Image: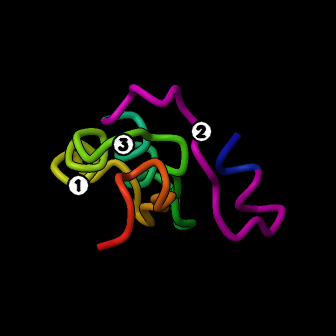
Amino acid sequence: MARALERAGAYWLEEPFARDDYEGPARLASMVDMPITGGEGYQGVSAYQKCLVNRTYDILQPDGRGAGGIF
């Protein structure tokens, strides 16, 4: 699906897997040329930390309210 979207001209793919799958998006990103993005729905800092450790997304999109605020 990602390759078909890429051929169709999609610029990015947002949250293509279940939110608790921290490794799937990283694997997909290594197979396609478009960025894999996500992270708006996470609550708390822990989930974002897991994303960074696992390199889950090319572009991590935290929502300031769910991430614990903007400091």
Q: Residues under labels 3 and 2: Cα distance? A: 11 Å
| In this rendering, position of residue 36 left or right of residue 13 | left
> In the displayed structure, would residue 59 be above or below residue 18?
below
The kind of secondary structure the magenta stretch mainly shows is loop
Judge depth for marks 1 and 2 and give the one in front. 1
Residue 63, image x and y in percent? 51, 58
Q: Residues under labels 1 and 3: Cα distance? A: 14 Å
> In the displayed structure, would residue 18 be above or below residue 28?
above
Q: Which residue is mark 1?
A: 52
> What residue appears at the point 62 percent right and 51 percent down from the top-left corner?
14
| In this rendering, position of residue 45 left or right of residue 64 | left
* 16 falls in the magenta region: yes
Local packing at callout 2 (Cα closer than 10 Å; few below 14, some 14-19, many 20+) is some
In the picture, which quadrant includes the N terminus? top right
Q: Residues under labels 1 and 2: Cα distance? A: 17 Å
Q: Which residue is mark 2?
A: 16
Local secondary structure at mark 2: loop
Q: Amino acid at mark 3?
A: Arg
Q: Which residue is mark 3?
A: 27
Q: In the rendering, which numbered label is found on residue 23?
A: none
> What residue appears at the point 39 percent right and 28 percent down from the top-left corner?
21
Residue 5, image x and y in percent? 76, 54
Judge depth for marks 3 and 2 and give the one in front. 2
Query: Of label 3 and label 2, which has the lower sequence position?
Result: 2
Q: Amino acid at mark 1?
A: Leu
* 9 falls in the magenta region: yes
| In this rendering, position of residue 12 left or right of residue 49 | right
